[in-house]
Amino acid sequence: MKRLSKYFHIFKVSISNNLVYVLNFITRNLFFLFIVYVMLLLWSNIYGQKGEVISGYSLRQMIWYLIVGEMVVLSKSNVFSEVAEDVKKGQIAYLLNKPYNYILYCFSNSLGEMGTRLLTNLFLGGLMGLLYVGPLQDFSLIHLPFILASILLGIFINFFIFISLALTAFWLEENSAFMWIYTKLVFTLGGMLIPLEMFPDWLEKVARYLPFAYVTYGPAKLAVDFNWGNYINTVFLQVGYLLIFILISLGVFRKGVRALNVNGG
Amino acid sequence: MSIISAKNLSKTFQVKTKEQGLKGSLKAMVSPQYKEIQAVKNISLEVARGEVLAFIGPNGAGKSTTIKMLTGILHPTAGEINVLGLNPTTDRRKLSYKIGTVFGQKSQLWFHLPPLDSFNLLGRIYEMEEEEIKKRISYLTELFEIEDLLETPVRKLSLGQRIRCEIAASLLHKPEIIFLDEPTIGLDVVVKQKIRDLIKTLSQESQTTIFLTSHDAGDIEQLCRRAIIINHGQIVLNESVKNLKYNYMNQKVIDIKYAESVTIDHPELKVLKSKGYAVKIEIDSSKCDIDNTISDLMKLGKVVDITISDPPLEEIISGIYQEKDIGGGYLEKA
């Protein structure tokens, strides 16, 4: 029991630590407000010329879709830059010689950050959706907890991909290019720019099997067009990808520790 | 019985090198060149339970690398290590319950939170009972005189205050061995002394084995019975501090500033530098009495300022090289 409860305490401390950054939170949220507003203008214009429904999405659905996608992405933790920084500055020496699993430590530590961000993003995103385009037709509150579960899975997959990439810092002096490429892949193939249905057929088929779609597209699509068949399918793939990336991160860590070269001091 | 033992320990790093300027950067991109750096070469050592050992050497000598291998953070390139019956490389987590570490230049406390939060969390990470954590915190609080600091965010503590909290944090789980890597670095004289006193109390009260690295000769003189000196990754000397003091650390440097011009003509004193009314003198404390020498010096004229200090560790090591005749020139190149 104590073996697991330590992670819960790490999570609790990380929440306290994150509450110190309230101002930072608010600034991020302003960015969220702004970006959704720009998308609203853009898509209103497109819908004005192309008609009521595009690729199965109404304007209202499109805006909610984009809001949910942003919610997932904006609720990420800083794990990538933190791990890279810890390795560069040698702080990693203190983090490795403790009786815990380092990956689980990072996860519990990030959970506080992701959780506090998600709460503010849910609130603000919901408010913006209601104010900008109004509630979705056919939306049922019963589905809400299920959609939330899928959003959380998206955030967790995002985390484990980030940490798998971040751990390359154990070998490389500079690894920020990985993060840059990955975030761009989520932006495009993950359906943050436009939903997968708007891709050419072949690309849509490919994207549906790639992990990026299950970070953002999966939960966002469920939020605007919920049906059980799609839900089970999406969550099944999300859990699968989550497990894969947990295993990858553990594997990369095991290898990386051997190659680690602690700087300074 | 030795609780730390290392045999023929070595660690080699691959370091990317690059010629100077933009041209060098471009060249390094196309065909990166690597240089092998041997941070630790063939070190063997033993430490007994309850011992306070000084592991010393100048910057870049391989002290930290050795500590990191002994605690399981770095994997050795070659050699064997046994700490408390465990192999740190493979049993890092198991070993972490039994050892504590302090890296003077880094922090294990949460930057934005008061130390108390970090202590409580560390107690849980080490799977201690809640009652036990409380007891231990109150014991360490008293010992380290950190009562007033417990609820101040770490970022607002001074370096000296923070180091006291860092050491307390690493002792929370009653480790059998504590590794202190440069615990006094960057501290002023008064705080340094305080930390030394604490370490002394610690070893006397709880019989904790202390493995201390430092590049401050004062740390060793006051704290340790035995010292291992390393330089360029190799053990230069492994001797009792008593012998070390007698043979190599008997030189003191006196900086004295007079209000008037004086001539120093003393057979036992070596004038290192003389500029205006200020003189720098080296004295061998095994040959002449410091007390008498100082009063002799004071009689020469009105003294404005006087300081007595140990020569830097680099000089002591250079002295050892000369004594052992293994080439002091090698050291000067570094």
Image (spheres, rainbow, N blue to C red):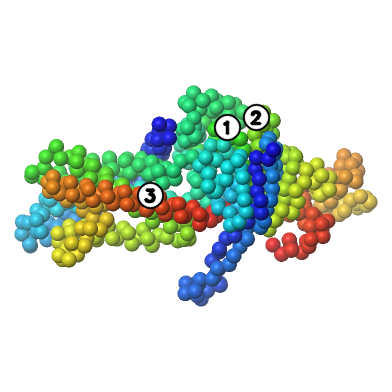
| Residue depicted at 15% across the width and 40% down the height | A143
Label 2 with label 1: CB-CB less than 8 Å = yes
Disc 2 residue crowd, few under 14, some 14–19, many 20+, Cα 10 Å: few
Judging by the rendered image, the residue that carries numbered circle 2 is B206
* SS for dot 1: loop
Do callouts 3 and 2 point to residues on the same chain? no
| Residue depicted at 40% across the width and 31% down the height | A1
Instruction: Please state if A7 lies on the left or on the right of A191 as rendered.
Output: right
| Residue depicted at 49% across the width and 45% down the height | A95
Disc 1 residue crowd, few under 14, some 14–19, many 20+, Cα 10 Å: some
Label 1 with label 3: CB-CB less than 8 Å = no
| Residue depicted at 51% across the width and 71% down the height | B32
The part of the image, by quadrant, that contains residue B181 is top right
Chain on which label 1 sits: B
Nearest the eye: B45 or B278? B45
Disc 3 residue crowd, few under 14, some 14–19, many 20+, Cα 10 Å: some
Query: Would you place residue B235 above or below residue B29 in this image?
Result: above
Tell me residue B86's x, y (percent): 58, 42
Instruction: Please state if B222 lies on the left or on the right of A62 as rendered.
Output: right
Nearest the eye: B4 or B195? B4
Tell me residue B184's x, y (percent): 64, 43
The part of the image, by quadrant, that contains residue B14 is bottom right
Judging by the rendered image, the residue that carries numbered circle 3 is A78
> In the image, what residue type sits under mark 3?
Asn
- Mark closer to the chain start, 2 or 1: 1
Query: Would you place residue B253 above or below residue A2 in this image?
Result: below
Chain on which label 2 sits: B
Q: Is residue B166 visible?
A: no
* SS for dot 2: helix
Q: Residue B174, labelled with which disc? A: 1
Query: Would you place residue A124 above or below residue A87 in this image?
Result: above
- Calculate the distance from the C-alpha at mark 1 to the C-alpha at mark 3: 33 Å
